[in-house]
Image (cartoon, rainbow, N blue to C red):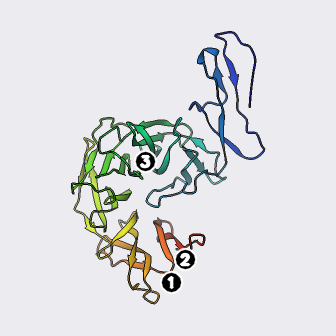
Amino acid sequence: PTWAGDVWQYESITIQAVPPTSGNWVFGRWSDGNTDNPRNLTPIDRITDLHATFKLHLGSSVSNATGPNNQRKIVTYGGVAHAVYASGGSMWYMRDDGSGWSNEVPISGGATTAKNPSIAISVEGMAVVNVVWEEDATCNGRRVVKFARSVDVGSTWQGPVNVSYCYSYDLAGADATPVVAALSSRVAVVWKSTTCLVVKMDPATNRTPNPDVFCPVPGPLSTAYERPSLVGGSGMFKLAYKDISGHVMYRQFMPNLDFTVSFGNPVDVSNPYSATNPSISSTVDQRIFVSWEADVTGGEQEGGSSGHHVFVTEKDPSTGWRAPVEFVHGSHLETNSTVCVDEDLDQAYVIWECSKLNSTRKCNT
């Protein structure tokens, strides 16, 4: 839309952007980063070129709006589903109370490079929605991890705030793929830097620039700590990650009152496979599920075929870790697995992409 006219120097005018075509459009932001619509302007603002960005409801400008597989994009609490995804360099939140998905709202301020979000619900006397994501080149050319939260079921948002600050080791040239999980009122954020996995406890209240760095092996590990996956439950945070050996490891940690954490010993859950892209979930009865993908020669199931397959393992609280189960579909490429649980039905699901060609994909459970 365009406008022209004369106003007094300090006179305020109100402008409102409207989508140019019919359809279920959602307002995103103005080109100067402002997210108010309508908004007030005065001539002394000296804005010479201003335009508005809209997006379609339930639409995204990026093909990986719901990826990567290690990050949860949807959670439920009290019968309400909460979802977050990226589009147009912004982070969008919506909820469904059973009557359908609400219109999305942008929660990343004026960001133009926001991507790779993760969502979790903490309980702090009420349900609190916590979201993390990463942005490109916003701190001396380095990527940063941002955090926002809502204490009123997504109606209004606090933040975003930078939880990774500007450390020399943070995110240079590496996707952070941050994950967030909750343990009652405690909230943990874990992300991948170039040399470590970094843990930050309670980012809403812990504003000191000293996250607890989880880096047991020194040296350049640009691919050694790939896409961490995180879940909370039964008094512990539970973490799955790829380590320098190329295997998927499981490690649990407990939050301390001073915002530090105490780690348990790592467990190699993918041995003997060199693996990638882990995902983790757990149940209220303390069972833990971890999935991953790996190149294998001679599959264990479905005729012993070789290829890139998906695996899942379970830890039973009384018997320990079980042998991995392999999912194979002929010579198809199995990638991007996500493991999740249904507490009501007492079932676990693994969902992944299965493709012989990139254009042919389907889900498996």
User: Which of the two marks, 1 or 2, is nearer to us in this view?
Assistant: 2
Sequence-wise first label, 3 or 2 = 3
Asked if the residue at tag 2 contacts the one at tag 1, i.e. Cβ–Cβ closer than 8 Å, the answer is yes
- Vertical order, 262 against 317 (above or below): above
In the rendered image, is residue 288 in sight?
no
Q: Residues within 10 Å of mark 1 (few under 14, many from 20)?
A: some
Look at label 3 and name its amino acid: Ser
User: Which of the two marks, 1 or 3, is nearer to us in this view?
Assistant: 1
Residue 330's disc is 1
Look at label 1 and name its amino acid: Gly
Instruction: Please state the total of marks drawn on the protein image.
Output: 3
Task: Where is residue 52? Give x, y as percent.
Answer: 66, 35
- SS category of the residue bearing label 2: loop
Query: Is 83 displayed left or right of 327 in the figure?
Result: right
The quadrant in which residue 20 appears is top right
Query: Is 207 displayed left or right of 351 in the figure?
Result: left
Give me the C-alpha separation between circle 3 and circle 2: 40 Å
Residue at the (30%, 64%) spot, across then down: 250
- SS category of the residue bearing label 1: loop
Residue at the (51%, 69%) spot, across then down: 351
Sequence-wise first label, 1 or 3 = 3
Give me the C-alpha separation between circle 1 and circle 3: 42 Å
Q: Which residue is mark 2?
A: 356
Q: Nearer the viewer, residue 230 or 319?
A: 230
Task: Where is residue 192? Give x, y as percent.
Answer: 35, 52
User: Which of the two marks, 3 or 2, is nearer to us in this view?
Assistant: 2
Q: Which residue is mark 3?
A: 122
Q: Quadrant of the N terminus?
A: top right
The quadrant in which residue 165 appears is top left
Look at label 2 and name its amino acid: Lys
Q: Nearer the viewer, residue 331 or 261?
A: 331
